[in-house]
Amino acid sequence: MAKDLEALARRKAKVRRAIRVAANGRPRLSVHRTSQHIYAQVIDDANGETLAAASSLEKDLRTSLKTGADTDAAKTIGKLVAERALAKGVTAVVFDRGAYIFHGRVKALAEGAREGGLQF
């Protein structure tokens, strides 16, 4: 179990280092997923603040989504976080998948954010 957590931490750190190099001052779109929900944040690392956020736990989404743990929910969250980021004036971000593989719900969230107008 400890080795799995160490591998997860190494993978996450590796992705984060690559993002810092590629960011060039752009905020990052960070994704976190659990077995039941998915979360997304647009974070400005230079100022240390969250510019926009969305999750499948929000009340208005809980009624419209069947579950927070499928690709449809992830795509909806991606569109919502993109809409909120565009309202704050953010058009370009770097995608931070964390330690997750770019597949399934993480990929669906990215596609939703792109459809919503974010560029990465």
Image (cartoon, rainbow, N blue to C red):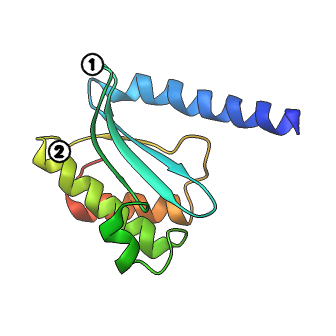
Q: Secondary structure at mark 2?
A: loop
Q: Is residue 19 above or below residue 80?
A: above
- Residue 16 position, x and y percent, is 52, 29
Q: Nearer the viewer, residue 20 or 87?
A: 87
Q: Amino acid at mark 2?
A: Thr
Q: Residue at x 28, y 63 (%)?
A: 79
Closest to the observer: 90 or 62?
A: 62
* Contact? badges 2 and 1 (CB < 8 Å): no
In the displayed structure, 119 sits above or below 65; it is above
Which residue sits at x=25%, y=49%? 119
Instruction: Tell me the crowding category of disc 1: few under 14, some 14 to 19, or many 20 or more residues within 10 angstroms, Cα based.
Output: few
The Cα atoms of the two marked residues, 2 and 1, are separated by 17 Å
Q: Secondary structure at mark 1?
A: loop
Relative placement, left or right, of 71 versus 112 is: right
The numbered disc on residue 47 is: 1
Amino acid type, residue under disc 1 in the picture: Asn
Counting from the top left corner in percent of width and height, residue 8 is at 71, 37
From the top left corner, tell me how far across and down residue 13 is, in percent. 60, 27
